Amino acid sequence: MRGCSEGCWNRPSAGCSAARRRLRATRWSPSLLTRQEAIYGRPPLKTAADGGFASRDNLRLAKTRGVKDVMFAKKRGLGVLDMVRSLWVYQKLRNFRAGIEANISRLKRAFGLDRCTWQGWPGFRQYVWSAVVSYNVLVLGMLLPAH
């Protein structure tokens, strides 16, 4: 499963997507950028991606689609300044990605997100979404002021 979770430990996840089949690690699907454009009406200004997606082709694809800063977890021969405007931006995006990984870790540990045993593709999607919605309800509950 490849998932996309946006947020931070103290903010609800803004989205989740599950690929029906595993994406090839070196090929960045343009549908990821298209999905963001459909939700927000424009391409993201910055993006942080797994090191498996690091390649010149994926960097070029993101830049031509309007993404200003692209951070890959592994450089794979790409220069930091080829990906982003400054080392400061690179570090901020790297830390943001670490927060996303923390969200995924929390979903696995606190909500028992593990190997899905629910039947078929609809069951898999229900399994993932139930964990994400539960996580969001918990985070929203923690953000409410105590009376």
Image: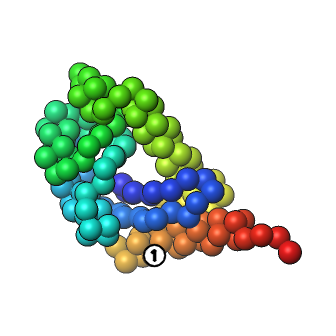
Q: Residue 4: which quarter of the image? A: bottom left
Task: Look at the image and tell me whether residue 39 can be seen.
Answer: yes
Q: Is residue 94 above or below residue 5?
A: above
Q: How far across and how far down the image is residue 98, in percent?
A: 51, 41
Instruction: Name the image quarter holding the N terminus.
Output: bottom left
Q: Which residue is mark 1?
A: 126
**Residue sitting nearer the eye, 96 or 110:** 96
In the displayed orientation, state which residue is furthest to the right: 147
Residue at 28% across, 26% down: 81
Instruction: Name the image quarter holding the C terminus.
Output: bottom right
Instruction: Give neighbour class at mark 1: few <14, some 14-19, many 20+ (Cα, 10 Å).
Output: some
Q: How far across and how far down the image is residue 88, in percent?
A: 43, 29
Q: How far across and how far down the image is residue 122, in percent?
A: 37, 77
Amino acid type shown at disc 1: Gln
Residue at 23% across, 28% down: 82
Residue at 33% across, 46% down: 46
Secondary structure type for disc 1 = helix
Residue at 56% across, 64% down: 12
Q: Is residue 76 above or below residue 59?
A: above
Q: How many marks?
A: 1
Q: How far across and how far down the image is residue 133, in percent?
A: 55, 72
Task: Look at the image and tell me whether residue 22 can be seen.
Answer: no
